[in-house]
Amino acid sequence: MQIGLDSFVAAVPDSLTGQNVSPADRLAQLLEEITLADQVGLDVFGIGEHHRAEFLDSAPETLLAAAAVLTKNIRLASAVTVLSANDPVRVFQQFATIDLLSRGRAEIIVGRGSFIEAYPLFGYDLRDYDSLFASKLDLLLALRKDTRVYWSGKHRPPLHGQEVYPRPLQDPLPIWLGVGGTPASFERAGILGLPLMVAIIGGEPHRFRPLIDLYREAGRRAGHGPEKLRVGIHALGYVSESDAQAADEFFPGYARAFTEIGRERGWPPTTRGQFDALRGPSGALIVHDPEQAVEKVLHFSDALGGIDRLSFQMSIASLPHKKRLHAIELLGTKVAPVLRQHHTERRAATVRP
């Protein structure tokens, strides 16, 4: 099982001290966090894409390119690329370049995004929400397959055999499909044989099992082997020395972020009781000490019929930089090795005569 981190590069005051840092300093912190994640042996670091005042990730490809030249082993991904509001040709070229800079460590996780600011910003009609994504995903996959591309679709001028460069080092360049809770999205990923990244930020993970089963069955019916039908989870999580410390440190920023989003979407303010319930054995939050974090990740995997990757999203809580660095160290030294050993032992047990 791969363990990683996702960041939205939150640019809001520190939730514990109230201190604010400049955008330049926050980006420098981000690169330090990615470098440490690489050094402690985490598998992947993803950067989101938003076009809002509270996040500094509107150009994730630029940030990933900077990380590519500072790191050696960690895989570098989007989390997610809002493909509906992007030009697939430019997306492919940018990630092919990151792949070359990193010597084969780039991944694209494409999705439609949970916010809608990108659509009017780049001149798209929100009523074309699904049509835009389906058409542009079709083009992105065509670009990955061939250098010379013949393609036509509804939302972009056709390509009549133009050659698209550069080509990535990896062949094929990994493309994951990032999904929320729409059955059609899970089924589409299975039919296409794309690995799946599921955002589980609330509720109970086991409720996603029917959708993941739908994905696997759609993939099987389309003729894709299980090695293609990988499942990753994007989860809100954080680790600290003790369970109580992790909760007390994570909650203030978590509550602020979700209460502010709730004002836009008609949700009530986030309470500590709701937060603590989500930290319970069957809840979606992985906010614990290292030992309990391991148990929670294993619960995710068992509840969903096995997962291949789990990425912790802790930037939403706008914690102090030193706290984030310490959490990264704990994930790399106390959480990921135990989960890898458990995965190895479980796999050996399944093939033992």
Image (tube, grey):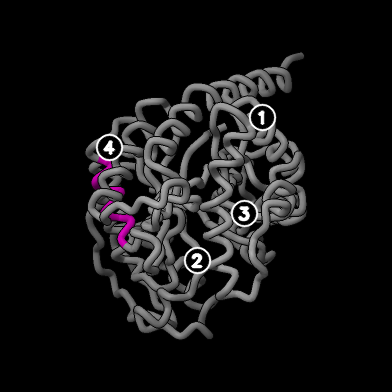
Q: Is residue 194 left or right of residue 280?
A: left
Q: What element carries label 2?
A: loop
For the residues labelled 1 and 4, say whether their Cβ atoms are less than 8 Å apart: no
The magenta stretch spans which residues? 59-68
Q: Can residue 225 be seen in this view?
A: yes
First in residue order: circle 3 vs circle 1: 3
Q: Nearer the viewer, mark 3 or mark 1?
A: 1
For the residues labelled 4 and 2, say whether their Cβ atoms are less than 8 Å apart: no
Q: Give the class, few, some or many, for how many residues have Cα within 10 Å of label 1's Cα (few <14, many ≥20).
A: some
**Vertical position of residue 106 compared to residue 341: above or below:** below
Q: Distance between the residues labelled 1 and 4?
A: 35 Å
Q: Residue 332, position in %: x, y?
A: 47, 27
First in residue order: circle 4 vs circle 3: 4
Q: How far apart are marks 2 and 3 (CA)?
A: 14 Å
Instruction: Name the kind of residue labelled 4 in the image.
Output: Arg
Q: Quadrant of the N terminus?
A: top right
